[in-house]
Image (cartoon, rainbow, N blue to C red):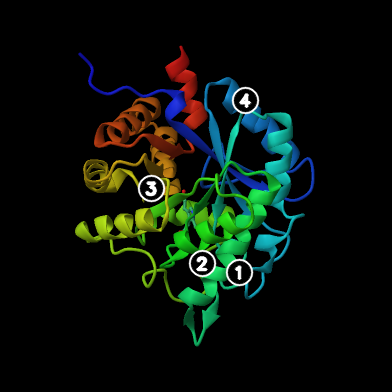
Amino acid sequence: MRETAISPDNFVYPLFVTNGSGVRLPISSMPGCFQESADNAVKNAREAFSLGIPAVILFGIPEYKDETGSAACKETEAVQTAVKALKDALPELYVITDVCMCEYTSHGHCGVIRNGDVDNDATLELLAKEALSHARAGADMVAPSDMMDGRVGAIREALDQHGFSALPIMSYAAKYASAFYGPFRQAADSTPQFGDRLSYQMDPANRREALREVALDIEEGADVVMVKPALAYLDIISDVRNAFDLPVAAYNVSGEYAMVKAAAQLGWIDGDRVMLEMLTAMRRAGADLILTYFAKDAAKILQQ
Ligand code: PBG
């Protein structure tokens, strides 16, 4: 009689990759998550894959940050290196890369700054170059998370022009300016050094706007559309599911994860049950895929 099923097959497991080898730095606000070099990312991904999790998404912690985020497109940087290592070691693992500038810019914004503000159009070119460099490294899908207008189209065009017309794009289509990203920004060292992301991310109070954002990304060529965050945005997941035909992804973000881990550590909630209830709710709302730091924890329970 149960209407909704969850399985490890629904999960995408996020990995924070860094340069070097033998690196495995715990992220204090996200217990169980690490900044790891490619060798350790392979070990982590192998464990996830053996638990039935088919896909990972990579976030990069680069060697250096500068005004224009130039490390984002470097062939030798953490993401590109990890993609190669993962595809070599685990060819069946589906490797997605997050495409954004905020991990690479010294100011922490998702694009280039002109006159004190993010310049949407100047950023598109950089994002397209970054996506292309991930594709060349062997990524199976690219996932732009910056929320610049027109970036899906710009990335699609660049990929098509360079022989990657079959490479799909998962767009962070309805991404809200949310406080739930706090622990991630610590993990990726990507907190904006001035201002906020309200000029390019969505207002949490807006529901109908999400459908406009998603429609635009689909028009530009998105193959999978994402709603982010997930827990406080189940209505949006449901709306998107009902309005469009494409696969819908939900991002169970860092703050959602950290709250459960912290309360469970204090003995205030049953962490495993809350985790499964949250993931089930995201599936019930209509998510086909869930990006979640819980992927391995949940898969271990679901496999029993
Ligand atoms: C941007 C990006 C962010 C997250 C994923 N991609 C942070 C932001 O927009 O500030 C957050 C994910 C999370 O909180 O788990 N590259």
Does the residue at mark 3 contact the one at mark 2 (Cβ under 8 Å)? no
Any mark on residue 105, and which?
A: 1
Any mark on residue 47, and which?
A: 4
- Marks 2 and 1, Cα distance to the nearest angstrom? 8 Å
Amino acid of disc 3: Met
The N terminus lies in quadrant: top left
- Marks 1 and 3, Cα distance to the nearest angstrom? 24 Å
Q: In the rendered image, which quarter is residue 270 located in?
A: top left
Give the residue at x 60% y 30%: 93
Name the side, left or right, on which 100 lies relative to 26: left
- Marks 2 and 4, Cα distance to the nearest angstrom? 32 Å
Q: Determine if the C-beta at disc 2 is less than 8 A from ligand 1.
A: yes
Query: Badge 3 is on which residue?
Result: 226
Q: Name above or below for residue 269 compared with residue 63.
A: above
Q: Secondary structure under badge 4?
A: helix
Residue 37 can be seen, yes or no: no
* Towards the viewer: 165 or 199: 165
Crowding around mark 4 (Cα neighbors within 10 Å: few <14, some 14 to 19, many 20+) is few
Q: Determine if the C-beta at disc 3 is less than 8 A from ligand 1.
A: no
Query: Badge 2 is on which residue?
Result: 110
Of the two numbered discs 3 and 2 in the rendering, the one whose residue sits closer to the viewer: 3
Q: Position of residue 22 (x, y in %)?
A: 78, 40
How many tags in the picture? 4
Q: Earlier in the sequence, mark 2 or mark 4?
A: 4
Q: Secondary structure under badge 2?
A: loop
Give the residue at x 60% y 49%: 164
Q: Position of residue 15 (x, y in %)?
A: 59, 42
Of the two numbered discs 1 and 3 in the rendering, the one whose residue sits closer to the viewer: 3
Does the residue at mark 2 contact the one at mark 1 (Cβ under 8 Å)? yes
Q: Name above or below for residue 74 compared with residue 166.
A: below
Q: Secondary structure under badge 3?
A: strand
Q: Earlier in the sequence, mark 4 or mark 3?
A: 4
